[in-house]
Amino acid sequence: MSFTVKSTGRASLRSFDIMCPACGYSEERSVDLRECETEEERNERIDRDTLIKCPNCEQATMERVWLRAPSMGTTHDPKSDTTIAKFQQSCRERFVKKEMADIQHKHGVNFGDSIRSAAVQRIKKKQKPI
């Protein structure tokens, strides 16, 4: 049995990545926004809940950072030429990796050794990699 969950309105929880500029400690922090009515209240709650001291070094205040990429649909036009080119390149790379994994599974360790030795020969000859 499967269930479909549909929600309307704004998200009640929002998560942020925060990092200490001094020691590099990072963590994910969730902010509860259920009781906020206006956009100003939401921004105040986010600013208040994400400004904390670093639990690792206890000297610096943690800053909000982007450790994960946002989803592609929210920041890019899906019909732009650059987005399509990047998508095609990603598909080609995934196809090549899958083909290599299938061949390596079929032929075993010898195939991986031959790929590495060919790469070493190209490096020795200062040739451009494939």
Image (tube, rainbow, N blue to C red):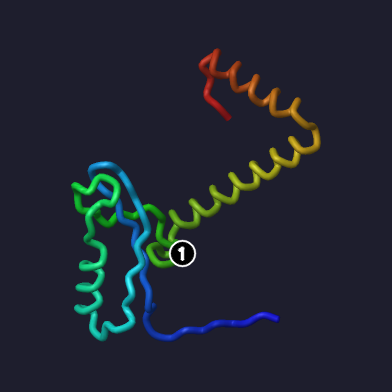
Residue extending furthest top?
Answer: 124
Residue at (80, 37) in percent of width and height:
106
Residue at 20% x, 53% y: name it: 61
- Residue 60: percent from the left, percent from the top? 19, 49
Q: Which residue is mark 1?
A: 78
Whole-percent x, y for residue 72 in the image: 44, 62
Q: Give the left or right position of residue 71, taking residue 18 as reference.
A: right
Say which element carries label 1.
loop
Quarter the N terminus occupies: bottom right
Quadrant occupied by the C terminus = top right
For residue 128, above or below residue 6: above
Q: Amino acid at mark 1?
A: Pro
Q: Position of residue 4 (x, y in %)?
A: 59, 82
Task: Determine the residue positioned at 51% across, 16% down.
Answer: 126
From the viewer's perspective, tell me whether residue 94 is left or right of residue 72. Answer: right
Q: Look at 25% across and 76% down and name the residue there.
A: 42
